[in-house]
Image: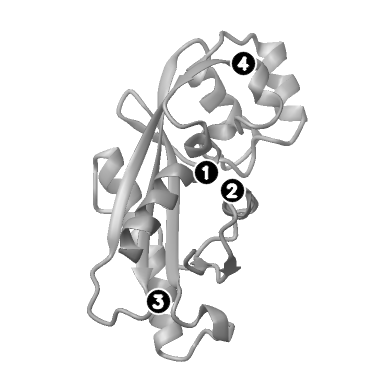
Amino acid sequence: MQKIILASGSPRRKELLGLIGISYEVHKSDADETVTATEPEEIVKELSARKAWDVVEKIRRGKLEVSPEFASGTVLGADTIVWKDGRLLGKPADRADAARMLRFLQGEEHQVYTGVTLIGLDRETEDADSFAVRTNVFVHAMNEAEIEAYLDTGDAFDKAGSYGIQGPFAAFVDRIEGDYQNVVGLPVCAVYHRLMQRKN
């Protein structure tokens, strides 16, 4: 299996890579996250590519040092957004913002998109290999007390859309259509098979 340099500090992405036995080293990107794209698939691909290229360029210029066994590895950039009715829901600014998002999502269907970009450090002329995966999420109706109780757990505040499917919010996820791990933060099935294709 290829060695991965993860351009993200997300604990969920680290856990998911480890879950399928991929060796990784973390070098978090600090790339600008403003976007020019307007469609959700293109937004996440643009952001994931920007993060991956940021780390690639720093490594190639000697501004980031990777372990010797990762020197010819593949940089993985990723970005996840929640999308509903043409609106992008990022991480909440504060509790009131998180509450607004949850009221917007409760009782309805929305989409989670994760963009992934893979760039091989040993391929000087390689273009970024970017793709996006979509999952539909159906949220049960929530009353104000349930929203406030969920916010009290503290689980909402570092996550796109103000919720984590793998935490207490699971009580309000009626069902999903698509890849569950994609909602957690990384579509590991798609990543694994893309990496396999790159080896051949």
Q: Is residue 112 left or right of residue 145?
A: left
Ranked by sequence position, the earlier of labels 4 and 1 is: 4
Q: Quadrant of residue 34?
A: bottom left
Picture coordinates of residue 139 (x, y %)? 52, 16
- Circle 2 sits on which residue? 16
Q: Amino acid at mark 2?
A: Leu
Could you tell me how many numbered marks the image carries? 4
The reply to whether discs 2 and 1 touch (Cβ–Cβ < 8 Å) is yes
Task: Choose between 43 and 128: the one closer to the eye.
Answer: 128
Ranked by sequence position, the earlier of labels 3 and 2 is: 2
Q: Which mark is residue 56?
A: 3
The local secondary structure at tag 4 comes to helix
Task: Choose between 118 and 168: the one closer to the eye.
Answer: 118
Mark 2 or 1: in front is 2
Name which residue lies at 59% across and 48% down: 16
Q: Amino acid at mark 3?
A: Val
Q: Amino acid at mark 1?
A: Gly
Picture coordinates of residue 152 (x, y %)? 77, 29
The local secondary structure at tag 3 comes to helix
Ranked by sequence position, the earlier of labels 4 and 2 is: 2
- Circle 4 sits on which residue? 172
Work out whether 41 lies above or below 125: above
- Circle 1 sits on which residue? 185
The reply to whether discs 4 and 3 touch (Cβ–Cβ < 8 Å) is no
Q: Amino acid at mark 4?
A: Phe
